[in-house]
Amino acid sequence: METGRRSTDTTIEEEEEEDMEQSGKQAIAAASKEVSDEFKTLIRQQDLDSLKQLQHIILGRLQDSNAVLSHFNDYSENCFAEVSSDLSKNTRLLKSMKSDLDYIFLKLRGLKAKIKATYPDAFPDDSTIEALDRRPDLEIAQ
């Protein structure tokens, strides 16, 4: 008998909670309507229509800009795809050329050191270079 009483009590409590929730929702809805009515009195309908029109104009411009930027991104992606293989190939070529030139200059320094050791007068010092070299300097503006 006590379980029957408990279920009746819980059912009554649940109904009371539902009634309170329903009345709370109604109160919120009424307050929302009152606030929206007050806002409507603050702003004229003509101003709202003007704002809506401006927003539509701005939306159209933003959509156009977005379309242009999307097209540009696609174009840039295609251009990069065309150029990237050449770029990587040329980068590898330049690295190879640099290592070859480093090796050549290393060998030249070694040969120069051997020649200078064998023939000390083969490479003149700085003061003698200026006296021997009478060519005009083309990099100096005249």
Image: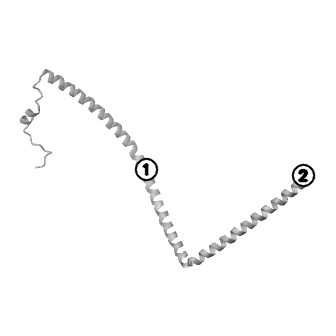
Q: In this view, does 17 lie above or below 77?
A: below
Answer few, some or many: residues within 10 Å of disc 1's Cα (few below 14, many 20 plus, some between 14 and 19).
Answer: few
Q: Which residue is drawn at 82% across and 62% down?
A: 15
Q: In this view, does 3 lie above or below 43?
A: above
Circle number at residue 3 = 2
Location of residue 18 in the rendering, given as x and y in whole percent from the top left corner: 78, 62
From the viewer's perspective, tell me whether residue 46 is left or right of residue 15.
left
Upstream in the sequence, badge 1 or badge 2? Answer: 2
- Type of amino acid at the residue the image marks with label 1: Asn
Q: In this view, does 53 lie above or below 78?
A: below
Image depth: mark 1 or mark 2 in front? 2
Answer few, some or many: residues within 10 Å of disc 2's Cα (few below 14, many 20 plus, some between 14 and 19).
Answer: few
Q: In this view, does 25 lie above or below 38?
A: above
Q: Which of 20 and 142 is in front in this view?
A: 20
- Type of amino acid at the residue the image marks with label 2: Thr
Residue positioned most to the front:
2
Q: Residue at x 27, y 29 (%)?
A: 103
Location of residue 30 in the rendering, given as x and y in whole percent from the top left corner: 69, 71
> Are the residues at dot 1 and dot 2 in contact (C-beta closer than 8 Å)?
no
Type of colouring: one colour
Location of residue 134 in the rendering, given as x and y in whole percent from the top left corner: 7, 38
Label 1 and label 2: CA atoms lie apart by: 76 Å
Circle number at residue 88 = none
Q: Nearer the viewer, residue 104 or 43?
A: 43
Q: What element carries label 2?
A: helix
From the viewer's perspective, tell me whether residue 98 is left or right of residue 131.
right
Q: Which residue is drawn at 69% across and 68% down?
A: 28
Q: What element carries label 1?
A: helix
Location of residue 122 in the rendering, given as x and y in whole percent from the top left corner: 11, 26
From the viewer's perspective, tell me whether residue 77 is left or right of residue 135.
right
Which residue position holds label 1? 78
